[in-house]
Image (spheres, rainbow, N blue to C red):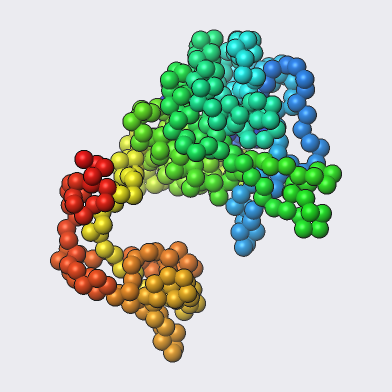
């Protein structure tokens, strides 16, 4: 049996599935239910200092984007950090950690960008016995307008400064949660590393408005006729999250910096993909909010079964394995040639591949009078659009041509893949590589 035990920053948990800082981790009741369901850890919903109370809206807090079958693809929220008293949260964290010593508890924090504010709250958190803290430098709404959250995460100098304070006044691991609402995520990650961060987590939510009510002419969710931008999460953000994770994992300046992956993790496969790109664990929010805490059971069993199938005995066997295969476009092998192939036995003759290719691509699929669809190799550039629009999995596949064959589209002989492709003269990035 595969061992899912995770040791992230020296923090042990029975599996790599942690709940992210969000409504599901707002109180003791939720967290206890999560641990009983099998979650390996939680990041407690973001705490702030005592002072002017945080007041959330008493109306709709979420907006949604649905697929054709009403499956939720993306969730937008306008909820702020916890509106519960700081002392109440601290007492609950202490109790839960005492009762679940084998589970990870990380405390998310957001206070004003002032040294004294951090110096005041950190000893209170340390006294709970929690395993570490996560600095919320990502929240794009409500708190960012007050100079916190993403307002800090978009300024590398602030990230480095606050991280240094936390490392000075707190003895346990410090994780910096990064905002995706930035041009180049490598810069804040490097700033966190310079400040002494033990790890980064990403992505936080993406600034968004999910829809507009065309009757009231206001963004949704609507509060008394008005709407606001919020944070977007869920399966739809996963590609953005994985790209940003990979950029940090392969950047020489941040090489070796531990990463906690966040963003649309819904299944065990999502988790495995994040971990293959360098994440030591993953954090989940939207999936738990849609399906409940027991969704983790499928994640655990699915990941374990896949690892057994692949012969992986521990998570470290595959963490980061995909990173060397992430490259810049100019280093892709332009001698590689593939062609689409349609499995006629699997084809249901819907015609989606033909319509997509004929109208918007390379006119590389023919349709006979009795609706048999065939690939025209002389026109096919293997763009993969037909595969993506086909409703039958594996009905259309891309088959690479063997070296020595003649590409009917170009009339050229397919060449061997060059071992030193980065310096080959056919490579448009060769000069840059040299």
Q: Is residue 290 left or right of residue 273?
A: right
- State the residue in front, 184 or 20: 184
Residue at image location 29% in from the left, 65% down from the top: 338
The single residue placed furthest to the right in the displayed view is 224
Residue 336 x/y as whole percent: 25, 59
Q: Is residue 315 above or below residue 94?
A: below
Q: Is residue 12 visible?
A: no
Quarter of the image that includes the C terminus: top left
The single residue placed furthest to the front in the displayed view is 431
Residue 167 x/y as whole percent: 50, 14
Q: Is residue 10 left or right of residue 29?
A: left
Q: Is residue 18 above or below residue 207?
A: above
Residue at image location 55% in from the left, 50% down from the top: 236
Residue 23 x/y as whole percent: 67, 35
- State the residue in front, 428 or 245: 428
Residue at image location 80% in from the left, 45% down from the top: 226
Q: Is residue 147 visible?
A: yes
Q: Is residue 66 left or right of residue 227?
A: left
Residue at image location 29% in from the left, 75% down from the top: 378
The single residue placed furthest to the bottom in the displayed view is 369
Where residue 334 sits, quadrant-wise, is: bottom left
- State the residue in front, 17 or 425: 425
Quarter of the image that includes the N terminus: top left
Number of disc labels: 0
Residue 87 x/y as whole percent: 71, 16
């Amino acid at each position: 049996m595969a061992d899912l035990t995770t040791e992230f920053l020296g923090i042990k948990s029975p599996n790599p599935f942690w709940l992210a800082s969000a409504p599901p981790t707002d109180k003791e009741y939720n967290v206890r239910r999560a641990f009983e369901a099998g979650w390996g850890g939680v990041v407690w919903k973001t705490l702030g200092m005592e002072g002017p109370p945080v007041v959330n809206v008493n109306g709709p807090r979420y907006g949604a984007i649905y697929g054709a079958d009403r499956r939720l693809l993306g969730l937008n929220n306008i909820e702020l950090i916890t509106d519960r008293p700081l002392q109440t949260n601290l007492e609950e964290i202490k109790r839960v950690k005492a009762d679940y010593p084998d589970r990870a508890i990380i405390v998310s924090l957001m206070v004003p960008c002032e040294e004294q504010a951090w110096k005041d709250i950190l000893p209170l958190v340390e006294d709970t016995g929690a395993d570490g803290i996560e600095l919320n430098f990502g929240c794009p709404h409500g708190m960012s307008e007050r100079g916190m959250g993403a307002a800090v995460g978009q300024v590398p100098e602030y990230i480095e400064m606050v991280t240094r304070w936390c490392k000075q006044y707190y003895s346990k691991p410090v994780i910096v949660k990064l905002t995706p609402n930035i041009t180049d995520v490598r810069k804040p990650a490097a700033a966190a590393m310079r400040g002494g961060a033990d790890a980064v987590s990403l992505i936080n939510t993406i600034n968004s408005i999910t829809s507009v009510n065309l009757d009231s002419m206001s963004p949704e969710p609507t509060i008394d006729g008005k709407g606001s931008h919020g944070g977007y999460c869920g399966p739809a953000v996963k590609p953005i999250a994985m790209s940003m994770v990979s950029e940090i994992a392969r950047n020489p300046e941040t090489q070796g910096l531990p990463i906690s992956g966040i963003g649309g993790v819904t299944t065990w496969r999502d988790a495995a993909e994040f971990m293959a790109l360098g994440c030591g664990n993953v954090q989940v929010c939207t999936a738990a909010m849609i399906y409940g805490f027991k969704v983790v059971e499928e994640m655990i069993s699915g990941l374990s079964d896949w690892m057994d199938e692949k012969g992986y005995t521990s998570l470290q066997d595959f963490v980061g394995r995909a990173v060397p295969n992430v490259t810049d476009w100019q280093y892709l092998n332009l001698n590689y040639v593939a062609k689409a192939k349609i499995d006629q036995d699997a084809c249901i003759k819907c015609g989606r591949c033909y319509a997509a290719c004929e109208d918007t691509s390379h006119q590389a699929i023919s349709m006979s009078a009795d609706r048999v669809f065939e690939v025209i190799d002389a026109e096919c550039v293997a763009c993969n659009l037909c595969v993506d629009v086909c409703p039958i999995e594996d009905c259309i596949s891309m088959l690479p041509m063997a070296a020595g064959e003649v590409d009917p589209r170009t009339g050229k002989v397919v060449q061997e893949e060059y071992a030193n492709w980065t310096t080959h003269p056919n490579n448009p990035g060769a000069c840059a590589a040299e």
